[in-house]
Amino acid sequence: MSATKRLTVAIPAKGRLQVGSIGLLEAAGFQPETYSERNLSVRCSGAPVDALLVRAADIPEYVQDGAVDCGITGADLVLERDADVVEMLRLGFGSCSLQAAVPEESAITALEELDGHHVATVFPRLTRRLLAERNVFVHICEVSGSVEIAPRIGLADGIVDLVSSGGTLRTNGLRSLGTLIESEAVLVASKGTAGALNGLVTALRSVVDARTSRYLMFNLPADALDRVVEILPTPGSPSVVPLRSSEHVAVHALVPAAEVWELLPKLQSLGASAILVNPVERVLS
């Protein structure tokens, strides 16, 4: 990042994506100064970065048109806007899926059976394209909110909407026909500015990678080291430190967080003791 030019990063003005974006910037060392819902722009201390708070759906166009240097928004919104931007990094929060759904009592039981029916959605372009790729052609009813109510008032036979846990579908008497795409928060940039964002991308990636990692430390009988190395899901070799007792060593390893629960009993069975599992703030590879 240039020492003379401040970077402008567009982030969602509200909702889960805003919370995740602010948290990511803070963890990466770009501490936003005091802000409220009335702020449109927030300076970040510790780096020449300004956060511009705008509608998440508008961010792809802001980035594409060069109004901002880069932006954080949902991958689904980038695809819906068909924005000419470069995806720099998947950010690991805001996970959801775009799903088709129908009322519980509907005779439609598969995506293919939506062919020729009316579908309500706030993602008209994306819905039409994704269904067409499956040879399903529907009549789109574009709405701006409360998609779930559309079948109940006779506007549509089904819906296509973002789903996180599925609770909203169940509450509104809907059942899923399947997922069209998976989505999460992404950092996007215009083709002209992508090359100037190396520092920002590196800082954010170090946090994203760290959140999916854990740092393991444990003591181990030296004669069990080879067997432990075989089961450690560690890129490269773990660090091995001799202990005062020549019969034991200390092993340090960075492992995927999702695999820790399966790994711990295996380590214990091989004689590992004093096992510590630590969160990681940054990972630079």
Image: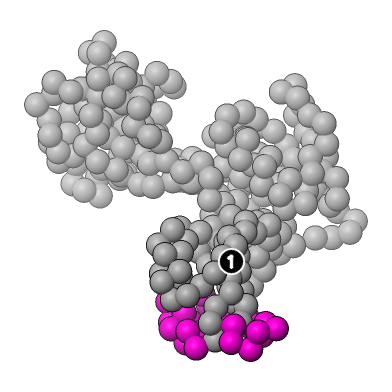
Crowd band around label 1 with a 10 angstrom C-alpha radius: few (<14), some (14–19), many (20+): few
Report the residue marked by disc 1. Answer: 274
* In the displayed structure image, the side of residue 271 where residue 23 appears, left or right: right
Residue 22 lies, with reference to residue 120, above or below; the image says below
* In the displayed structure image, the side of residue 49 where residue 271 appears, left or right: left
Could you tell me which quadrant the C terminus lies in?
bottom right
| Nearest the eye: 130 or 248 | 248
* In the displayed structure image, the side of residue 162 where residue 103 appears, left or right: left
Which residue is located at x 65 percent, y 65 percent? Answer: 283
Could you tell me which quadrant the N terminus lies in?
bottom right
Whether residue 237 is in magenta: the answer is: yes
Name the amino acid type tagged 1: Ala
- The picture places residue 231, in percent across and down from the top left corner, at 42, 76
Label 1, secondary structure: give it.
strand
Whether residue 13 is in magenta: the answer is: no
In the rendered image, is residue 214 in sight?
yes
Query: Residue most toward the top?
Result: 153
Tell me where the magenta segment starts and ends, as one range: 223-248
Residue 129 lies, with reference to residue 219, above or below; the image says above
In the rendered image, is residue 193 in sight?
no
Which residue is located at x 58 percent, y 87 percent? Answer: 247
Quarter where residue 157 is shown? top left
Which residue is located at x 70 percent, y 83 percent? Answer: 244
